[in-house]
Every structure is written in C-alpha cells, then in structure tokens.
Amino acid sequence: MSKADEIFIKNCREIIDHGFSDEHLEVRPRWEDGVPAHTIKRFGIVNRYDLADEFPILTLRRTYLKSAVDEILWIWQQKSNNIHDLHSHIWDAWADADGSIGKAYGYQLGVKHQYPEGEFDQVDRVLYDLKHNPASRRIMTNIYVHKDLKDMKLYPCAYSVTFNVTGNKLNAILNQRSQDMLAANNWNVVQYSALLIMIAKATGFEPGELVHVIADAHIYDRHIPIIEKIIANEPYDAPKLNVADKKNFYDFTREDFTLTDYKYHELTDKIPVAV
C-alpha cells in the first residue's frame, strides 16, 4: 500500500465516521440542480509526506499527474489568472467571458514587491532566498490577500506555502483553508509535491517533507457513496516518479514528469461538482 493511499483512507474514514455535518446550516455551495451542497467535515487535519520515501499519488483511484503539474505551473510559473493559459477545464466554472478568474491564485504570485535586495514577485523571492539565505525562516508565499478578495472569482483554498531547509533537504508546509476530499485532496498533494521537487532541483536541495495542513477537510453529501467505493479498493504499491533534471524553475514543463509502474483503480462514477 502506498503512503498516500494509507493517509487518504484514514482521513476519509475519520471524516465519515466522526465528522460534523452541516446539514442543519445555511451553506453557500449548490449542486447543479440548485440543491444546497452539504458536507461532513473534520477540523485541523495534518498529513506528512516524505518525498524521499515515495511520491504520494493515489492508487485507489487515478490522479492525473500531467494535468496536476500543468495547473501548478499555471499558478506558480506562468503566474496566470486566465484559463486560456491552462490545458484542462477545471477552472471554467469560475472564469468570466474573457477567461479571467480575477485577482486570484497566479495573479497574486506575480505581483512585485520591493525588498532591500531589489524587486521580486513572491515566487522569485522564494527562489532568491533559497539560493542566498537558506537558513531563513521567512521563506513563504501568501495569496489570500484581503484587499483583493472582492476581485477574485474564488477565494484561494490552498493559500500559503512555507519553505524550510534542514541540512540538504527542502521541506514545505502547504496551508489550506478548505479541502474537498474527493475532488481535490490528492490532486493538491501531487501538485505541491511536484512543486517542491522542482524548486528543490532549481535551488540545489534534495526534496524532503511536504506537510499538508487542512483547516476544513470535508466530503460533500453526494460524494460519500463514491468515497466509500474508492477506499474499499485494494491499494497498489506507489509508482516511481521520474523528473527531468533542470536547474531553472522556469524551464520545467508538464512533460518533464512521468510515472513508472503506476497501477490504479479506474473511477467510473461521475463526480458531481458543487459551486
């Protein structure tokens, strides 16, 4: 069993068996038929993934590696807020007629700020500090910018990453205010693990731990039967991740990531989306 499978099963079982249901509360999300989309949740889940041990991708169901990497590059490398720069259609529901999601996600990472060493956006500041001041405890990003929330089509879910160097290992903490366990949990784990690996390669470190902190880890009511099917599957061993050896973060593409021996269970259920 892969570590990612083990953690996912544990999280989902804990939410379903011991979670808090908001069915008696007014909620913002709606299903396509207009019915309120209620959830059952656990507060404050913390998961640790050692990337030196294995790449944390689910085998209980397929996680689409290249699409996940494509989105993280859209946000962190292109610093884009327009879906026309993205290969998938996962953001279509939140884009305007021009394809913009407003001042959200990649937009915030691309805003430049003045520092004593010069002008940097948030990504370039991370790269600079890891190369020039790796002992710093201030290497972090934040895209939950309150003054711009009114101009965002969707408030950031994964909103902050803190990088920390220990010896020759680069570690990171991903802070997430809200997590749809079925649609996004392993997707986010995979893409931020890939991000950590790319930044480690670009700054001369070995990938270490990704710590994923989730404030509100939830399963939507109509997703529970699908989750039960998924976690009943027999897990496989984790596949091997192959990543191109590049020294410039901005040179990576989604084609630089491949998996060897990735065995997974097919998900045949159509996943309803709450917006």
Image (tube, rainbow, N blue to C red):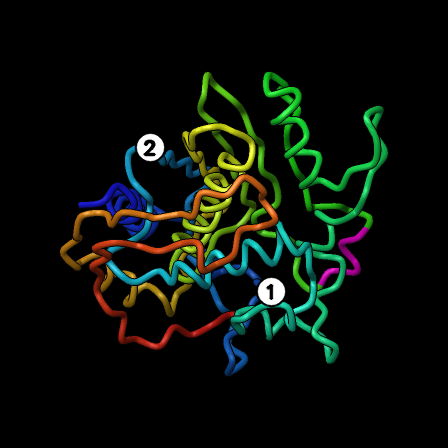
Res 155 → quadrant: bottom right
Q: Is residue 236 left or right of residue 130?
A: left
Farthest residue, direction left: 234
Among the two numbered marks 1 and 2 on one chain, the one whose residue lies closer to the N terminus: 1
Q: Quadrant of the C terminus?
A: bottom right
Looking at the picture, does residue 256 appear above or below residue 275? above
Inspect the image, locate mark 2, and give the three-letter code of the amino acid beneath it. Ala
Q: CA distance from mark 1 to mark 2?
A: 40 Å
Res 106 → quadrant: bottom right
Residue 115, percent from left and from top = 83, 29
Magenta segment main secondary structure: helix
Q: Badge 1 local density, few (<14 within 10 Å), some, or many (20+)?
A: few
Between 135 and 144, the residue placed more toward the observer is: 135
Q: Secondary structure at mark 2?
A: loop
Residue at image position (64%, 34%) is 127
User: Which residue carries the number 1 mark?
Assistant: 28
Magenta range is: 148-152
Residue at image position (64%, 28%) is 139
Inspect the image, locate mark 1, and give the three-letter code of the amino acid beneath it. Arg
Looking at the picture, does residue 134 appear above or below residue 28? above
Residue at image position (61%, 45%) is 159
The mark closer to the camera, 1 or 2, is 2
Farthest residue, direction bottom: 33
User: Which residue carries the number 2 mark?
Assistant: 52
Q: Is residue 179 left or right of residue 123?
A: left
- Residue 153 among those drawn in magenta: no
Residue 137, percent from left and from top = 62, 20
